[in-house]
């Protein structure tokens, strides 16, 4: 699997709207890794994770062809991850498609919002449940339960193909024990995980700061879920959590790295 991080920013992106913080000023420098669009990713050019308000810009910046997407998988209904209006542009009258060229995989909340907005559209939607596995062509998708957006079930995602497993864990919060039990019986070959609060813990338990992420990764490695060689990158960064350069230095002792927009890796 080839994973490309299209966006690695939190809800307000970086430079954040209406902010002139030091990190936001750094993000305006040419080629800055502090410039972050809202969190999204792409697997093998064919599975799109989340469809947020920066989707068009990400397509343009990365030279993507959305007609190759077989599936769009949503994590939850927060607007930085789910912009329902973008779905309509996949069909007539915006083009000649009579049906969406992709299947939507979404939790019950997201599915309900889409059907309410487009009740008569010929959409292909699979409503996903945590800890159940779904086949997407050659891939298997298993959503797991995050602690975020409650009472909605926010889904973190595990993808498997050809014996390799990749975990995409944005908006995790501190996982409930049922999720830990599942993960500790699972092997992941690579993982992308949120570090929204970065170096400055906000106290909100629906997101992770670095001081919380470190023991999470240590527990996963101790359980054998992640090997010492398994690559781990962070995403969903707030401008309040420190600059990319500061995060690189802070994470170096723990053998994981801050992700950035455009990062690609394969497993």
Image: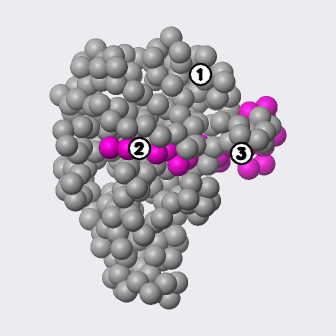
Q: Which label's residue is closer to the chain start, 1 or 3?
A: 3
Q: CA distance from mark 1 to mark 2?
A: 20 Å
Q: Which residue is identified by label 3?
A: 16
Q: How is the image coloured?
A: one colour
- Which of pointers 3 and 2 indicates the residue nearer the eye? 2
Q: Evaluate whether residue 79 shows in this view.
A: no
Q: Quadrant of residue 33?
A: top right
Residue 116 as seen in the image, left or right of residue 179: right
The N terminus: image quadrant: top left
Q: Which residue is identified by label 2?
A: 3
Secondary structure under the numbered disc 1 in the rendered image: helix
- Which of pointers 1 and 3 indicates the residue nearer the eye? 1
Answer above or below: position of 62 versus 131: below
Q: Position of residue 77 (x, y in %)?
A: 45, 57
Q: CA distance from mark 3 to mark 2?
A: 25 Å
- Which of pointers 1 and 2 indicates the residue nearer the eye? 2
Q: Residue at x 53, y 34 (%)?
A: 259
Q: CA distance from mark 1 to mark 3?
A: 20 Å
Q: Which residues are magenta?
A: 1-23
In the rendered structure, does residue 80 fall within the stretch colored magenta? no
Q: Which label's residue is closer to the chain start, 3 or 2?
A: 2
**How many marks are shown on the rendered structure?**
3
Q: Which residue is identified by label 1?
A: 248
Crowding near the residue tagged with mark 1, few <14, some 14–19, many ≥20 C-alpha atoms within 10 Å: some
């Amino acid at each position: 699997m080839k994973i490309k991080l299209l966006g690695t920013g939190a809800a307000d992106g970086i430079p954040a709207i209406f902010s002139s913080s030091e990190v936001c000023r750094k993000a305006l420098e040419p080629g800055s890794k502090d410039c972050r669009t809202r969190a999204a990713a792409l697997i093998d050019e064919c599975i799109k994770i989340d469809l947020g308000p920066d989707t068009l810009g990400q397509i343009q910046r990365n030279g993507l062809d959305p007609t190759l997407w077989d599936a769009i998988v949503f994590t939850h209904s927060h607007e930085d991850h789910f912009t329902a209006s973008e779905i309509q542009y996949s069909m007539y009258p915006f083009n000649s498609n009579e049906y969406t060229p992709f299947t939507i995989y979404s939790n019950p909340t997201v599915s309900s919002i889409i059907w309410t907005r487009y009740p008569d559209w010929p959409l292909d939607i699979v409503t996903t449940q945590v800890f159940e596995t779904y086949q997407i062509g050659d891939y298997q998708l298993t959503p797991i339960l995050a602690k975020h957006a409650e009472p909605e079930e926010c889904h973190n995602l595990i993808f498997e193909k050809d014996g390799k497993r990749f975990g995409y864990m944005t908006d995790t919060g501190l996982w409930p024990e049922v999720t830990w039990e599942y993960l500790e019986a699972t092997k992941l070959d690579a993982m992308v995980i949120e570090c929204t609060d970065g170096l400055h813990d906000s106290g909100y338990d629906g997101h992770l700061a670095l001081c919380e992420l470190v023991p999470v990764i240590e527990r996963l490695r101790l359980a054998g879920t992640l090997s010492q060689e398994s690559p781990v990158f962070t995403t969903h960064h707030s401008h309040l959590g420190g600059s990319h350069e500061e995060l690189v230095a802070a994470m170096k002792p723990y053998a994981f790295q801050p992700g950035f927009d455009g990062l690609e890796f394969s497993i």
